Amino acid sequence: MKITSFNPIIVTRDPESAVRLFEELGFEKDHQKDGIADSITAIRMKDANGFHLDIATRDSPRDTVVIRMNTDNMKETVQLLTSKGFTWAKGFSGPVETPSSVFSILASPSGFVINIIQHIRK
């Protein structure tokens, strides 16, 4: 298993405000993916130093921060984390496939959440 990137995801019901704030901090929109799991939009941002930040929409009363971890082997990564006590995050029971990636959202025993993503190369 190889981790190919690692960065925060801000999950919010007001993505426009978060985007504006991080644009003021020097980030620019890199790309946007709509319709993930039917209702999620993810905005990928990047700054001049190469740091990444994702902003995802979710109708939730509070903003949350999740760790994004891109990997080259979803199955191996999920097996490693579940062997350490991670479980599927609320609302998830397995990997979710999109046309360009597969992702799994797992919660640690202490409560932090990791969104594992493996891109599908064609």
Image (cartoon, rainbow, N blue to C red):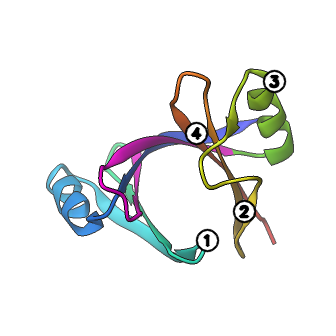
Q: What element carries label 4?
A: strand
Q: How crowded is mark 4: few (under 14 residues within 10 Å), some or many (20 or more)?
A: many
Q: What element carries label 3?
A: helix
Q: Can residue 73 be seen in this view?
A: no
Q: How far apart are marks 4 and 3 (CA)?
A: 15 Å
Identify the main secondary structure in magenta.
strand
Precedes in sequence: disc 1 or disc 4 = 1
The dot on residue 37 is 1
Question: How many labels sit on residues?
Answer: 4
Q: Is mark 2 on a helix, strand or loop?
A: strand
Pointer 2 residue: 96
Precedes in sequence: disc 2 or disc 4 = 2
Magenta extent: 52-70
Amino acid type of the residue tagged 3 in the rendering: Ser
Asked if labels 4 and 1 touch by Cβ distance under 8 angstroms, the answer is no
Per the image, is 112 magenta?
no
Q: Distance between the residues labelled 1 and 4?
A: 17 Å
Amino acid type of the residue tagged 2 in the rendering: Val
How far from the left and from the top, in percent, is residue 86?
Answer: 69, 30
Pointer 4 residue: 114
Pointer 3 residue: 83
Q: Residues within 10 Å of mark 1 (few under 14, many from 20)?
A: few
Q: How far apart are marks 2 and 3 (CA)?
A: 20 Å
Asked if labels 2 and 1 touch by Cβ distance under 8 angstroms, the answer is yes
Q: Which residue lies furthest to the left in this view?
A: 24
Q: Nearer the viewer, residue 109 or 75?
A: 109
Quarter holding residue 6? top right
How far from the left and from the top, in percent, is residue 96?
Answer: 72, 62
How far from the left and from the top, in percent, is residue 64?
Answer: 37, 45
Q: What element carries label 1?
A: loop
